[in-house]
């Protein structure tokens, strides 16, 4: 059994709670710009003092409405400034926030509200209110429903006019590191979502070490970040709390269709994204170059960027690569960085494997993507690559104060102050995941090298066992396939079968461009068996197969005429594949691969 731990480097507070950051910011730097809000006129700044005043007023309204310390208050909204404001207002009132993905169905909303025993919910718009109305009759403990679209913040502020400052301060200061801060429900890739109990202390530990380790991001000159991932997910939530702690300016954008324009106007210095975002940036740039007749130039520039990054890792960049890199910095790389706002030097990637090649490409371009690893149950990151310690293809070393262990079956176990308190109302699941001595079973298979760098190789429950008894981790193949510009999603199959195969969906934005360049008319459904298209996908399959043995390689594949989305229930809000649902819906397609 292999084990590695990183010594603690800071002292984590043993008293207080997350609201202390907001109070401290207003006291120490009252005019510091903590937020820039999107308005019809552009970005409008919010100072530390203004934010504290708004949180105070909103929290008083919650108190006046009868929300008691420890009560659960749900948030159902897209990523926006009010989400952050309400999150802290709930904590100021001594309550517990329960985020719900804004895409959740009425039945999913009902389950979370019922299971958490939420006393109130703040939704975003009429569509959300309609979904809540469908199930409200079944929720005896739900006393209040407010809507951001109906001025929930202003309504709460007016409701709390008679609450004394002293009474609110007593509420605010009452929570300790041991108290529950939030219930975050897992996205449910393997069944009904479970509520992860995350304490103020979990956040304080996680952010104490993360902000300190990533000081170059959070405390750099004019540090700022644009949050576009769902704040209902722990990944974006931790960035929100960390930025407030470090006084890095935050912007929110709820609509990713406007993401590129928002990036250029906001000009963040660092970003948080899932690998699919980086894949889309690369593929879009590649396709745009091809459409302009500069595809070969871009391809060469990409190879040089990758070689340049590999040279950084090796400690020596060949002269020829340096010369070409200087040339492409003007012709190609600068345009890519300008598209991200022109100030972004770092990005944090998590949620799935980024892919070594893509990581090298972005670092070679000038955007260092720091890949990390964590789960909802671990308050986001357990490990991450650092600006001064990066090894591509890994998720970095454990954070200070965190230990990793590789069990006999290859499963990764972690122990540290960021590991959650357990599952809400589910002692059996808690006992299965969390050992008495604090070791948490992640369900992921991985390796730890001699320097402590961690490499994720698959999910324990997703290991495929072929008819020949070969164990295959599908993630290795799937991650490489998704890096191809034409491929949107894929699933590797073969459990109990004589060989490994795959279902592939195409990117709905990239496919039309490819079809036009290759003189293909009609819909995708007309071309799923087109020899040219199959040859293109076969090249991606061949590349993916280089990462595995012959027995693990993909022998057959099928191109589907539809993509998988969150709306059809096949992806989670964080864009993870719901493997069980995909297999269920595409059983006939899978069977056809073996007949």
Image: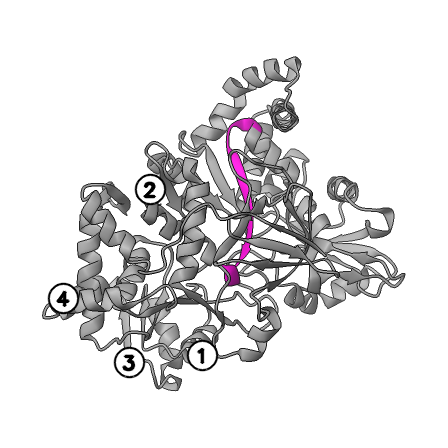
Secondary structure found at label 2: loop
Quadrant where the N terminus is found in the figure:
bottom right
- Which contiguous range is marked in magenta? 364-378
Query: Which of the 4 quarters of the picture holds residue 302?
Result: top right
- Which residue is located at x 75 percent, y 60 percent? 408
Decide which of 48, 343 is in the foreground and name it: 48
Q: Which of the two marks, 1 or 3, is nearer to us in this view?
A: 1
Query: Which of the 4 quarters of the picture holds residue 82?
Result: bottom left
Mark 4 or 2, nearer chain start: 4
Alpha-carbon distance for marks 4 and 2? Answer: 29 Å
In the orientation shown, which residue stands out farthest toward the left? Answer: 162
**Residue that numbered label 4 is attached to:** 166
Mark 2 or 3, nearer chain start: 3
Residue 376 magenta? yes
**Residue that numbered label 3 is attached to:** 143
Mark 1 or 4, nearer chain start: 1
Discs 1, 4 touching: Cβ within 8 Å: no
């Amino acid at each position: 059994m292999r084990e590695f731990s990183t010594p603690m480097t800071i002292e984590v507070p043993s008293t207080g709670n997350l609201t202390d950051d907001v109070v401290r910011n207003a006291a120490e730097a009252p005019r510091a710009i903590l937020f820039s809000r999107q308005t019809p006129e552009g970005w409008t700044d919010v100072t530390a003092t203004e934010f504290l005043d708004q949180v105070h007023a909103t929290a008083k309204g919650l108190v006046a409405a009868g929300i008691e310390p420890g009560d659960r208050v749900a948030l159902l909204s897209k990523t926006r400034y009010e989400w952050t404001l309400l999150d802290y207002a709930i904590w100021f009132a001594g309550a517990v926030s329960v985020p719900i993905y804004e895409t959740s169905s009425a039945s999913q909303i009902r389950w979370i509200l019922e299971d958490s025993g939420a006393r109130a919910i703040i939704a975003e718009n009429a569509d959300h209110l309609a979904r809540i109305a469908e199930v409200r009759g079944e929720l005896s403990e739900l006393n209040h429903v407010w809507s951001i679209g109906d001025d929930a913040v202003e309504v709460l502020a007016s409701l709390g006019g008679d609450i004394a400052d002293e009474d609110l301060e007593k509420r605010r200061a009452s929570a300790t590191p041991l108290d529950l801060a939030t219930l975050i429900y897992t996205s449910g890739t393997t069944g009904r979502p479970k509520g992860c109990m995350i304490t103020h202390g979990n956040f304080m530990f996680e952010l104490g070490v993360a902000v300190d380790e990533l000081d170059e991001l959070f405390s750099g000159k004019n540090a700022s970040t644009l949050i576009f991932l769902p704040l209902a997910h722990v990944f974006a939530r931790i960035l929100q709390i960390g930025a407030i702690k470090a006084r890095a300016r935050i912007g929110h954008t709820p609509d990713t269709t406007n993401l590129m324009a928002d990036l250029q106007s906001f000009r963040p210095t660092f970003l948080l994204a899932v690998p699919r975002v980086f894949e889309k940036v690369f593929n879009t740039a590649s396709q745009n170059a091809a459409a302009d007749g500069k595809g070969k130039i871009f391809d060469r520039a990409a190879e040089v960027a990758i070689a340049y990054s590999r040279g950084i890792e090796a400690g020596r960049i060949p002269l020829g690569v340096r010369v070409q890199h200087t040339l492409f910095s003007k012709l190609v790389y600068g345009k890519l960085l300008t598209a991200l706002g022109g100030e972004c030097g770092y990005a944090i990637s998590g949620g799935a494997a980024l892919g070594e090649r893509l990581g090298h490409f972005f670092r070679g371009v000038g955007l260092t993507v720091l890949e990390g690893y964590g789960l909802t149950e671990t308050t986001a990151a357990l490990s991450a690559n650092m600006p001064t310690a990066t090894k591509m293809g890994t998720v970095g070393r454990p954070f200070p104060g965190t230990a990793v262990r590789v069990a006999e079956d290859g499963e990764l176990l972690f122990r540290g102050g960021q590991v959650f308190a357990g599952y809400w109302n589910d002692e059996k699941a808690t006992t299965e995941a969390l050992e008495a001595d604090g070791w948490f079973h992640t369900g992921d298979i991985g390796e730890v090298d001699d320097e402590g760098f961690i490499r994720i190789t698959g999910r324990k429950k997703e290991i495929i066992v072929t008819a020949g008894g070969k164990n295959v981790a599908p993630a290795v193949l799937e991650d490489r396939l998704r890096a191809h510009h034409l491929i949107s999603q894929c699933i590797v199959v073969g459990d109990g079968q004589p060989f490994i195969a795959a279902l592939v969906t195409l990117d709905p934005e990239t496919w039309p461009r490819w079809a036009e360049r290759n003189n293909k008319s009609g819909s995708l459904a007309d071309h799923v068996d087109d020899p040219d298209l199959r040859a293109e996908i076969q090249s991606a399959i061949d590349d993916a197969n280089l990462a595995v043995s012959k027995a693990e390689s993909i022998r057959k594949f099928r191109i589907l005429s539809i993509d998988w989305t969150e709306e059809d229930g096949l992806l989670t809000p964080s864009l993870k594949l719901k493997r069980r649902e995909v297999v269920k819906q595409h059983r006939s397609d899978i069977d056809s691969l073996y007949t």
